[in-house]
Image (tube, grey):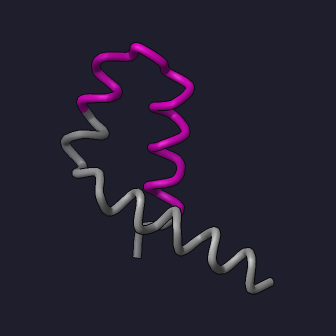
Amino acid sequence: MSANSIFTRTHRVVIRQFDLQDIEAFYQYRADPSIAIYLKERAIFTKP
């Protein structure tokens, strides 16, 4: 359970380093859609 918390916390820190505009730009480029989708899902999941 504590390992899960650390994992979630790490993801939050990583996502916070990305600006929303960066994520949107990532989507527009679509160089790798799977990564963009993953980032968007994580961003939604970790939103306060």
Above/below status of 16 relative to 33: below
Instruction: Look at 39% across and 16% down and name the residue there.
Output: 30
Per the image, is 44 magenta?
yes
Q: Position of residue 29 (x, y in %)?
A: 30, 17
Instruction: Looking at this view, name the residue that lies furthest to the bottom.
Output: 2
Taking the image as shown, residue 23 lies to the left or right of residue 46, namely left
Residue 21 sits in which quadrant? Answer: top left
Q: Main secondary structure of the magenta part?
A: helix
Instruction: Looking at this view, name the residue that lies furthest to the right.
Output: 1
Instruction: Looking at this view, name the residue that lies furthest to the left.
Output: 21
Instruction: Look at 52% across and 62% down and name the residue there.
Output: 11
3 vs 45, nearest the viewer: 3
4 vs 29, nearest the viewer: 4
Above/below status of 47 relative to 48: above
Magenta span of residues: 25-45
Residue 2 sits in which quadrant? Answer: bottom right
Taking the image as shown, residue 36 lies to the left or right of residue 6, namely left
How many numbered badges does the structure rendering display?
0
Residue 22 sits in which quadrant? Answer: top left
Q: Position of residue 39 (x, y in %)?
A: 47, 43
Tell me the quadrant of the picture where the C terminus can be found. bottom left
Q: Position of residue 41 (x, y in %)?
A: 53, 47
Tell me the quadrant of the picture where the N terminus can be found. bottom right
Q: Position of residue 24 (x, y in %)?
A: 27, 35
Instruction: Look at 66% across and 80% down and name the residue there.
Output: 5
Taking the image as shown, residue 46 lies to the left or right of residue 6, namely left
Per the image, is 41 magenta?
yes
Above/below status of 43 relative to 5: above
